[in-house]
Each structure stands twice: as structure tokens, then as C-alpha cells.
Image (spheres, rainbow, N blue to C red):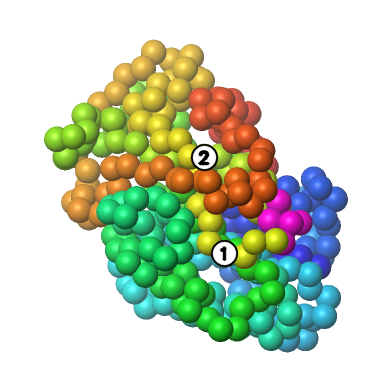
Amino acid sequence: MIVITGAAGFIGSVMVSYLNQNNFKDLVLVDDFSKLNKKPNYFNKQYSITVERNNFFEWLNNNHKFVQIIIHLGARTDTTEFDENIFNELNYNYSINIWKNCVKYGLPLIYASSAATYGAGEFGYNDDENIIPQLSPLNPYGVSKNNFDKWALSQNEKPYFWAGFKFFNVFGPNEYHKGRMASVIFHAYNQIKQNGNLKLFKSHLPKYNDGEQKRDFVYVLDVVSVLFYFMQNRKKSGIYNLGTGKANTFNFLANSVFNALNIKPEIEYVDIPLDIKDKYQYFTQANINKLRLAGYTKPFYDFETAICEYVTKYLSNKIYY
């Protein structure tokens, strides 16, 4: 059995499909299954059982002998949420409990961290574990992820294999339910279809022109490919960046979506909302040398190609992966 937490969510449900396509069907899906808008994400997937998030540790205590690995992708991911108690419960303490159970039962662990841990990028975007205690995330979500990374590194008792992945800006199918937290590509597609134009944030820093802010955008199919590799090749435990290693501008993103829709680009630049203005990342770019040294050699999707596939194959038909 392979356990996937967050299995009804965006990346988790894509991971379930990817495993199915690679002939892994004995899966345990863990999530809050009361959220009906997520049901299409796992509908028609092949799995053995669903387990409610709050019942998972009781289930694991009774069934750990059948479990091969835990892929922990469940988390509260809302970067505009500022109630630290929510993140402490769902991200930090829940992850600690999963770690301790993996140690107790001798299970390998793969878990999701986040590039939000890097904050404004004062220390760059290098996944050197020595700099993790110095990082200053810009929101409680990033703080909760970084706190768990720090806690994991400080432990004397670790799973015999474990790997945490700092996801950069992930986009792709199965994010229909995410609302404001869906990717920029998702929102760009819907704005263009509805209005014929697209609004991007102005730059409030002189060194960046409007729309020239840069992010490392990574296609969700690349993300699950990396996780699958580490699931099968459990050699080098540690914390890894999971991005493409190449930053792209929002203007390039916008033009790529317009091109995929065969619509002439029309972009309006608007002020960044006040609730995120001082917490906005202007540049992210993963250093992926450590990932490559661990043996993952597969090339990442070209950004424009990934956008075109996402728009034409999935978004235009509201298709799930």
C-alpha cells in the first residue's frame, strides 16, 4: 500500500493518477473528503480505500504492516490566511505526527515543503540545508513549512529514507477547486476567456518593470515525476528544491496563454492587493543541482509548451488528469 495524504487536492490527485498510470493501484487516499468540490479530482481513480484525515493515525496504527511508503502532500496552502493556529495544526503538528509514525513503523517518507520558505530570497534559492534555520518566510504558510523543515533536520530519529521537496510555483490540471490560490495560468485563462484581456500586478520595485517579475513555474506533471523517482530510488535523504531551475516573467506567461488561445494579447497592470503587497515574491528560481546529483536526469517541460498543453488539453475542456 502507498499512502497519499492530500489525495483529493491538486498535486495529491495528480500523484494518484500518475501512480495508476504506472500500475500502482493499491493506494490509500487520505484527505478531508467532506469537500465535495474536490470529488472530481479523485473520481474514477483506482485505489483501495479512502481515510479521513482526522482518522488517519488510528488507521495507520492498525494497518502499518501493509504500508510501503507515505507521500505526505496534505496541507493548508492558503498564503493569504494569517491564523497561525490553523497552520500549526494542519501543517506543522500533523507533519510531525506523520514523521514520528514513519520512524515508529519503519516507513519511508516523502513530504511537501514550499519555496515560500525562502521569503524574499535574501539567502538565494539554494537548497543547502545549513541555511534553512536562517530563512524568513513572508507569511504564516511559509513559516509553518519552514518550521517543519527545521524540526525534521534537528531530529536524531529519522525515517530510514525521507525527502522533503520545496515546491516552486506549481500549475496544471486538477486545480479547479483552489479559488484564489489557483495558479496564475489558471486565472489568466479564465480572465481572458471572460473579458478578452488580462490583469497583471504592477511592479512596486524600481528594478522590475511591470509584468517583469519572475517566478520558477513548474508543471505539475514534472512535480509528480520527481516524487515518483524518489519513491523508487530511496538513496539520498534530505530537502530538495522542486522547480525547473529557470525563472520566467509574468509577461511571458501572459503572452503564452494568449497564444494558446489564439487571441491577441491585451494586458492591463493593476496594483498588488494591500494584504499581500509586502509579502510578494518578485523573483524565485530553484537551484536544482542537488536534485540532479540525486540522479533525477529527466528534462522539465518547456514553460510555453506546458502552458499550451494545460490550456488546450485540460482547461479548455475542464478535463481532469
Near mark 2 (Cα within 10 A), the count class, few <14, some 14-19 or many ≥20, is: many
3D distance between C-alphas at marks 1 and 2: 19 Å
Determine the residue positioned at 44% across, 73% down. Answer: 150
In the picture, measured across the screen, residue 223 lies left or right of residue 78, that is right
Question: In the rendered structure, which amino acid carries the disc numbered 1?
Answer: Gly
Q: Which residues are magenta?
A: 229-234
**Residue pointed to by mark 1:** 238
Q: Is residue 75 above or below residue 278?
A: below
In the picture, measured across the screen, residue 33 lies left or right of residue 270, that is right
Q: Secondary structure at mark 1?
A: strand
Image quadrant containing the N terminus: bottom right
- Which label belongs to residue 244? 2
Quarter of the figure with residue 315: top right
Residue 105 versus residue 275: which sits nearer the camera?
105
Question: In the rendered structure, which amino acid carries the disc numbered 2?
Answer: Thr
The magenta stretch spans residue 230: yes
Determine the residue positioned at 34% across, 74% down. Answer: 84
Total numbered labels: 2
Q: Is residue 257 above or below residue 201?
A: above
Q: Which secondary structure class fits the magenta region best? A: helix
Q: Is label 1 or label 2 in front?
A: 1
